[in-house]
Amino acid sequence: MEKEIRFDYPEESGFILPHELEYFEPEILRVHNLIHARKGPGHEYAGWVDWPLDFNRAEFDRIKRTGEKIKEIADVFIVIGIGGSYLGARSALELLQHSFYNQLPTNKRGGPEVYFAGFNISPAYLEHLLELVGEKNLAVNIISKSGTTLEPALSFRVFRRLLEKRYGKKGARDRIIATTDQAKGALKELADEEGYETFSVPDDIGGRYSVLTAVGLLPIAVGGINIDEIMQGAAEGHQLMSRVTLAENPAYRYAAARNILYRKGKVIELLATYDPAFLYFSEWWKQLFGESEGKDGKGIFPASTNFTRDLHSLGQLIQEGYRNLFSTTLWVENPTVDTEIDKLEKNIDGLNYLAGKTFHFVNEKACRGTMAAHNSGGVPTLKITVPGQTPFYYGQMVYFFEKACAVSAYLLGVNPFNQPGVEAYKKKMFTLLGKPSANLLPKNVK
Ligand code: PA5
């Protein structure tokens, strides 16, 4: 077995007392049983729990084959989706690809440039993307479980028209892949009608838990990431995070610790990462926890900081502002690349004392120093250590956070798998847009 994800916090700081964790043990056992027996609120969406073991192998192989085909026919791959239908794939690609992947020469990329659309309603974003695509060969993956979400549906209209104009209806058919509900919905109906290749979003897996399904895996595979390794990491994550006790299970300790802090008025959690490659992983994490926990007047507000960048913007507030925060550092132990610091003949910047050390060495000291400073400033600091920034550990991290999130939400007393509040803005927006009433719309459109 590879090294495991770890969770810890400075016990001597006294923000979490040893007996407080112990008091959570029976609750953890109860919640563990609820999740594994699929009996808790929202259990009909617990398909993610055993997914790393029982995912559909035939569809997985088809994802890999389609990924290879797209690599052959496309110079640009546009992934259209929003929320849970987009953040997972983007988090994986930004974490695991070269930092400047799309700008690399084709032979270094080994696949098409990958861009995302349909997660906003910005005309400038869309027009600039179209400009960037220009005459390049194009393929599109439209991802929408419902098939009727406004933002991706609007963008898809534009790219579908472009594909049909450029390649004809038949040619466009070979370049559009729809990831949607396996049986129903507007997109499924359109895909069947037009003959698009389709991949399914399982009925029992909600958007924010769907990155390990075709929703995330097809774009990730097209982006050149080894999805076998992701699923192996997730399977190991499943094994590790199925352990019952707090002592053995880092995801359960994390869930208990954040609930202890929440009950002490720490209502905002800052996910602190130390590499820009984690920016979209943080966005994925925010949706996972925000949509799962923020309901019934409760919920820890999930915020994110990317250090050391944000120490030069938010650092002051974190250190000395209102004491309603705790932070969770997500630290990678072994970076994939590292750079040694040179010795200068003239030590103008005074940094020669670091000569021979590496950037990772300095980053690690920045991480430890920041945690110590925040801790002494009254910000409890939790830490999750990931052994490597690899597809395997990406899979393990995803499973770690999914499990921790479900457990944490049940400890909080909310249904982790619904999102009734998301409808509120849609209702107001559709009224303003003058959307016709449901009975005047085509079937399947809500
Ligand atoms: O987690 C969720 O359920 C949401 O974020 C959805 O994924 C998002 O609203 C997109 O929905 P759909 O896939 O139906 O277009």
Image (cartoon, rainbow, N blue to C red):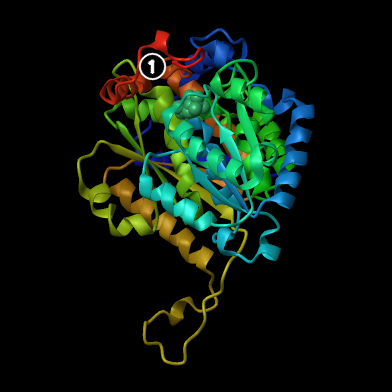
User: Looking at the image, which residue sits at the far bottom?
Assistant: 345
Of the pair 48 and 72, the residue shown nearer to us: 72
Q: Residue at x 67, y 63 (%)?
A: 106
| Left or right of 269 on screen, residue 130 | right
Q: Is residue 229 visible?
A: yes
Residue drawn 40% across the image and 39% down it: 120
Residue placed most toward the observer, 177 or 363: 177
Relative image position of residue 387 (x, y in whole percent): 61, 48
Question: In the rendered image, which quarter contains the N terminus?
Answer: top right
Q: In what quadrant of the picture does the C terminus appear? A: top left
Residue 315 % position (x, y): 28, 54
Image quadrant assignment for residue 51? top right
Q: Which residue sits at x=64%, y=37%?
A: 176
Amino acid beneath label 1? Pro
Residue 78 in the image, given as x and y percentages of width and height: 56, 45
Disc 1 packing (10 Å; few <14; some 14–19; many ≥20) = few
Depicted 152 relative to depicted 422: above or below: below
**Numbered circles on residues, count:** 1
Examine the rendered structure and indicate whether residue 298 appears above or below residue 288.
Answer: above
In the rendered image, which residue does mark 1 sit on?
A: 420
Left or right: where does residue 152 sit relative to residue 376?
A: right
Let me know if residue 252 appears in the view: no
